[in-house]
Image (spheres, rainbow, N blue to C red):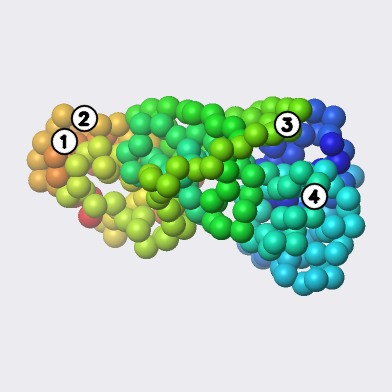
Amino acid sequence: MRLVFMGTPDFAVATLKALEQAGHEIACVYSQPPRPAGRGMAERPSPVHAHATARGLEVRTPLSLKDPAEQARFAGLGADAAVVVAYGLLLPRPILDAPRLGCFNVHASLLPRWRGAAPIQRAIMAGDAETGVSIMRMEEGLDTGPVCKLGRVAITPHATAQSLHDALADLGARLMVETLAQARVECAPQPAEGVTYARKIDKAEARIDFTMSAETVRNHIHGLSPFPGAWFMRDGIRIKALLCEVTDGAGPPGSFLDDRLEIACGSGAIRLLRLQREGKGAMTAEEFLRGWPVTKGAEAR
């Protein structure tokens, strides 16, 4: 097929690569404009933009798709379909209607659960047993379109937002290729019940509340790992917790139960396995303790 690809973050690159490898013609790539990044705040293209440029593909980075002239440019590409993966702009009706077969989206949840901006993080934070990828034919509503293909992934006790991101990116790429290979793409309306919304992650919600149960604290830590990173304070220093496990320890919430990073919660306890001190890189618990030992009874606030 002749396709337009629309995506921005690293999550979308896997699908773009898979479409190329499947032999589809990528007529054009749309992505968010380059943004200032790094210490020098130089403008940096998105991961999708960088990959497309390296492959010699045309890249367009409009600030909006509401302009009729921009919509006419899109329609002029004569695409069979558009593939959309975490693009970051709403698609108005003229864009949705332009491709012959419509616009198809890779969404990282089991729709209608977790429509919206942060489905991977919210699924972990909510303690869901599984999540997955939905291939959806797009409508004007927020992730409301009919689902054409579904793939499931279990959320294990050690799953983090990063590990789940990587697994779902690969699964979404495979399912999109399979969807477009069908002689006729059939999609079913989403159920009316079970709708939830994955609101964007706010850095203000990243601080760990050790009065919650150990399972809730673990889900909070893993859902925000590695970014923005759930954190606590010790001796005036902010420490991000990136990986942990639940234990059966007990004590005042927030207190260290031993010298190996076991911390009491409202019920049960967690043991930190990977951490990051403010201004330092991520490290294992053993590496952390070599530079900054803890004592039983100390507090994490």
Between residues 251 and 55, which one lies in front from this camera angle?
Answer: 55
Amino acid under disc 2: Thr
Tell which circle, 1 or 4, labels the residue nearer the N-terminal end: 4
Mark pair 2, 3: CA separation: 51 Å
Q: Position of residue 51 (x, y in %)?
A: 78, 44
What is the crowding at mark 4: few (fewer than 14 residues within 10 Å), some, or many (at least 20)?
many
Q: Quadrant of residue 133?
A: top right
- The answer to the question of whether label 2 and label 4 lie on touching residues, with beta carbons closer than 8 A, is no
Amino acid under disc 4: Pro
- The answer to the question of whether label 1 and label 4 lie on touching residues, with beta carbons closer than 8 A, is no
Mark 2 secondary-structure assignment: strand
- The answer to the question of whether label 1 and label 2 lie on touching residues, with beta carbons closer than 8 A, is yes
Between residues 92 and 300, which one lies in front from this camera angle?
Answer: 92
Q: How many marks?
A: 4
The residue that appears at 37% across and 50% down in the rendered structure is 230
In the depicted structure, whether residue 232 falls above or below residue 275: below
Q: Which residue is mark 1?
A: 268
Q: Position of residue 186 (x, y in %)?
A: 65, 34
